[in-house]
Amino acid sequence: MSKITVIGIGPGNLEDMTQRAIAAMENADIIMGYSTYIELVEKYFHGKEFLSSGMTREIERCRLALQKALEGKSVALISSGDSGIYGMAGIMLEVVNDSESGVPVEVIPGITAANAAAAILGAPLMHDFAVISLSDLMTPLEQIYKRVECAAQGDFVLCLYNPKSKGRSDYIVKARDIVLKYKSPDTPVGIVRNAGRENEAYDIATLANMLDFPIDMFTVVIIGNSKTYIEKGRIITPRGYDLQKRVK
Ligand code: SAH
């Protein structure tokens, strides 16, 4: 029996992968994951066995990882960003627990899309923030909207993952309308596409005009709190320091 390492590879570029993630992939016999992420890492890790699969085959992927580990292989199961944030860590632990096999599972953290996007925008996450996925593949839509509503009401900065995809183009419109009940139309909004990957791009918008900018399934949308402002092209959520007072 060998072990399974569940790895967050960061947004996609080698520079944003942790040393620990790189070492774990170097030490693995097999690297497994969704095909897009296998394509991202393949060029860095020669001589490995790569196993890729489609997006909706998570349970099968975890069962295969378990089977390979039981055959004595060391398996690296990769997710983009952090593997514990809408990634593979939870389901892998559940599959191993369910099997009663006792295969050891190590979870290695990665830079999640919200961190990567925030750094591109400036410093929008300096105060309390809530991360919400608009994907209703496994979460009822009413619960998603309720969380958006509560977070907006609580004046959290919001990070929206899975903001849009084919067949779900109106969720972001509805989420924005809910947020507008509690936040000013001038609230800064950062829209980051493909952070740390080819075709990285971002727009700095407001709640009022955010829907005029391209938003797709490789986008994170960050909506500020009531104190967030835009200056010199960067989004800043103040922590609360009094700059004037400190200078005196
Ligand atoms: N485990 C991942 C999230 C997977 S959910 C993480 O921690 O980042 C997939 C969603 O993450 C996408 O719909 C998008 O909203 C966001 N995302 C992932 N990678 C991204 C990137 N490089 N740039 C912008 N958004 C990204």
Image (cartoon, grey):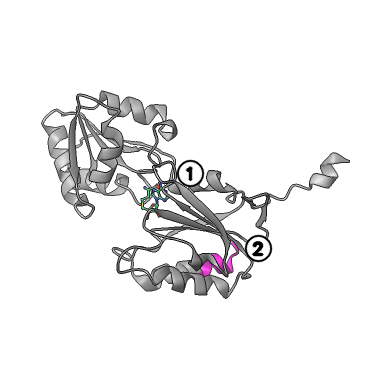
| Image disc number at residue 225 | none
Note whether residue 101 is visible. Answer: no
The reply, left or right, for residue 179 in relation to residue 199 is right
Q: Quadrant of the N terminus?
A: top left
Q: Is mark 1 within 8 Å of ligand 1?
A: yes
In percent of width and height, residue 44 lies at 30, 28
Total numbered badges shown on the rendered structure: 2
Q: Residue at x 19, y 42 (%)?
A: 52
> Residue tagged by mark 2?
226
Q: Which element carries disc 2, helix, strand or loop? A: loop
Instruction: Please state which amino acid type lies under the numbered disc 2.
Output: Ser
Relative depth, front residue between 248 and 52: 52
Q: Magenta region: which residues?
A: 149-155
> Residue tagged by mark 1?
116
Identify whether 50 is placed above or below 233: above
In percent of width and height, residue 146 lies at 45, 71
Q: Residue at x 43, y 68 (%)?
A: 172
The reply, left or right, for residue 152 in relation to residue 32 is right
Q: Quadrant of residue 83?
A: top left
Q: Is mark 2 within 8 Å of ligand 1?
A: no
Identify whether 82 is placed above or below 207: above
Whether the magenta-drawn stretch holds residue 3 is answered as no
In percent of width and height, residue 108 lies at 36, 35
